[in-house]
Image: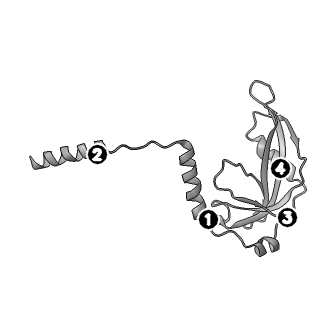
Amino acid sequence: MKKLCLVIASLLIVSCVQLKPFSVEEYQANKKMELISKLPNPPSPAEVEHASYGKLPNDYQKMIKSYLAFFLKDPYSAIYEFNHKPVKGYIQDLELNSGRPTFGWLVNFNYNAKNSYGAYTGKEYTQFFVYKDINDGNYYARPTSKSSFDYIFVETK
């Protein structure tokens, strides 16, 4: 009988606690702070100034177009506008270089492509990070989406 009373009392207490549902924005903000807290300290200004950014590959535009072609419905319809000069910068990404800074080039550009209905979707401004991998020595291009929480980008002069 004591066990039954204890179970009933526990259920009453638990049922009184209200769990507040949280929004997607709250979840994303918490996730972002969790990821940022795992990153090592950013490099010092001296490290940024003397870092090796690598040479910007001549075919960086082709690398970016190849990456995007995988995700576009009609990659042959894509129109690219590389109107901005690439700038040196770095990212700190938990999956890339264990969160230590990776130095390279930020490329800003616009693109427009057709959707499934054959209509152009409208210009989209985007950014890619082009870098030389320290392990295999090859160059890679990755998007630096603002909704992606594993990127922290600081542009350098």
Residue ID for mark 4 = 108
Residue located at (64% from left, 65% from top): 98
Task: Give the residue type that dot 1 points to.
Answer: Leu
Crowd around label 4: few <14 · some 14–19 · many ≥20 (10 Å): some
Q: Quadrant of residue 105?
A: bottom right
Crowd around label 1: few <14 · some 14–19 · many ≥20 (10 Å): some
Of residues 121 and 139, the one drawn nearer to the viewer in this rendering: 121
Mark nearest the camera among 4 and 2 is: 2
Residue 120 placement (x, y as % from top left)? 81, 29
Residue 145 placement (x, y as % from top left)? 71, 48
Q: Quadrant of residue 70?
A: top right
Residue 35 placement (x, y as % from top left)? 58, 58
Residue 39 is tagged as 1
Q: Earlier in the sequence, mark 3 or mark 4?
A: 4
Q: Earlier in the sequence, mark 1 or mark 2?
A: 2
Of residues 154 and 17, the one drawn nearer to the viewer in this rendering: 17
Crowd around label 3: few <14 · some 14–19 · many ≥20 (10 Å): few
Residue ID for mark 2 = 14
Residue located at (66% from left, 47% from top): 147
Question: Taking 22 as reference, is 107 above or below it?
Answer: below
- Determine contact: label 2, label 3, CB under 8 Å: no
Task: Give the residue type that dot 2 points to.
Answer: Val
Mark nearest the camera among 1 and 2 is: 2
- Determine contact: label 1, label 4, CB under 8 Å: no
Q: Earlier in the sequence, mark 1 or mark 4?
A: 1
Instruction: Please tell me whether mark 3 sits on a helix, a strand or a loop.
Output: loop
Residue ID for mark 3 = 157
